[in-house]
Image (tube, rainbow, N blue to C red):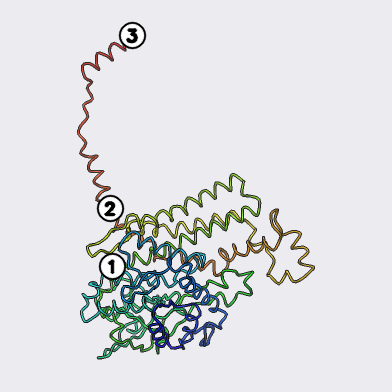
Amino acid sequence: MNLQKVEMKQAARGPALRTGDEYLRSVDDGRAIFVDGEKIRDIRRHKGFAEAARSIARLYDIAADAGTRELMTFTSPKLGHPVLRAYQIPRTHEDLRARRLASEKWAEATFGLMGRTLDHVASFFCGFAAVPSVFAAGGRNFSENMLAFYEHLRDNHLYASYAIVPPQIDRSKPAHKQTDPALYAGVVKEGDDGIVLSGAQQLATGGVFSDYIYLSCIHPLQPGDENYANAVAIPANAPGLKLYPRRPFAALATNSFDYPLTSRFDESDCFVVLDNVFVPWERVFIYRNIEVCRDQWWKTPAHLYGNHQAQTRYATKLRFMIGLAKRMNEMTGNDSNPAVQTQMGELAALVSVVESMLLSQEYLAKIDGNGVLWPSRTTLYGVMALQSELNARMIDTIRELTGAAMISLPSSARDFDNPQMMSDIEKYMRSASSDAKDRLALMRLAWDFIGSEFGNRHQQYEKFYGGASFLLKMNLFHNFDFKRATALVDDALRLPDVEFSASPDLERSLQAESRRGA
């Protein structure tokens, strides 16, 4: 179904939220997705994408369900009907908490394994719309364009992903000094009705499933890079827009018993190619402006809102991770082992650090002069700077706890169908507390989380989630309150000198004590 028709239907019916079925029908819109040497006709019928699309559809159904609607929605200030909580601009601490609880509900539905669900980029648009003056600095009607598009996404319950990183072709050179000026996504033509873009951009995680792709740049740009300093919204089925997903791991999953996570939650990461893609002016928010392209991330709360959602998702994933370890310990009979309890205590400490830092972002949030709440930069960037280290440490601990359990498994679920094999499996692969099939289901779940291609992609994803670790630490360096810390040092250096000669009374007392001792 054409996206424009979907949106017109949504607007016409008023208060109703988008359902999972409506979402699934909308992605059959002719978008150009290329996998395994061919163009995919319909992601709903492709093994590599179908179940992930259904997982996203379930998120829409959670929001539309009467039992969870109050949690998942708020009232549109423009239309007066319920819209997704993900598009709420927080103005109080309670607003930010409500956003977290809604994101947590969605994250639990995917066990924290889909990092770019529709509340992620929605959060960035909330940040953009909260400080439209940043976009107004670029001239034209860019501020009005941004606000109108934010409302369009919000009031039609739409799903946006983003591609904001240039391709890794030659990072030793800025964009305008690449061998071909159309390698990075940039402007190749301007007209009265809009602009034309060509080039490539990454990494549109979830791009194959979204309604729109927000194309901009978060990398530092230099003078001369103006052609690449843009921000536009492009429908996923726009002519000339091509999506090249990495290998979809779900396509290789033989069944959902052996690959319980891969088969359902592989959100896909996409390389985006633009071949003379036309964008009308009303969908242009930044145009050839290096300063505004940079400021959209740092002079609005967009980066904070988007990563507050991301840390909510990550905390949920860590709870799933430690829950998985606990169930494996219980099944193997190691749960009461003091050494195992020590390791589990360390895991619990690390999970608690992430959870506490997430809550601190809310508690320490500040309201600006326009009444908009900004999460704490220090606590957000503090936990993000540690994420790659903590995640690897936790994964390694779980590997130690499981030992050979995850790799001494039957070859596949088909082994259960062979009576001769099943007799051995039932006898030797059970645990003290469960039969063989239940034990193997848990171990397959653990392997899919840690050892499969899907699991290893997640480790790479978390390692570089916010970019290279040095960038995250630089963010923290620029936002930490060093002034308060160094003031303590200065106070210590200004302490008055200490007189070490004793007072007359103390001196007489010490002499008397000395005589008694003698």
| Amino acid on which the number 2 mark rests in the picture | Asp
| Amino acid on which the number 3 mark rests in the picture | Arg
Viewer-nearest of discs 3 and 2:
2
Give the class, few, some or many, for how many residues have Cα within 10 Å of label 3's Cα (few <14, many ≥20).
few
In the displayed image of the protein, which residue is found farthest to the right? 420
Viewer-nearest of discs 3 and 1:
1
The part of the image, by quadrant, that contains residue 171 is bottom left
Residue 104 pos. (x, y %): 45, 63
Q: Give the Cα separation between the discs numbered 2 and 1.
A: 20 Å
What residue is drawn where x is 27% and y is 12%?
A: 511
Residue 348 pos. (x, y %): 50, 51
Q: Give the Cα separation between the discs numbered 3 and 1.
A: 74 Å
Element type where label 3 sits in the image = helix
In this picture, residue 151 sits left or right of residue 413: left
Element type where label 1 sits in the image = loop
Q: Give the Cα separation between the discs numbered 3 and 2.
A: 55 Å
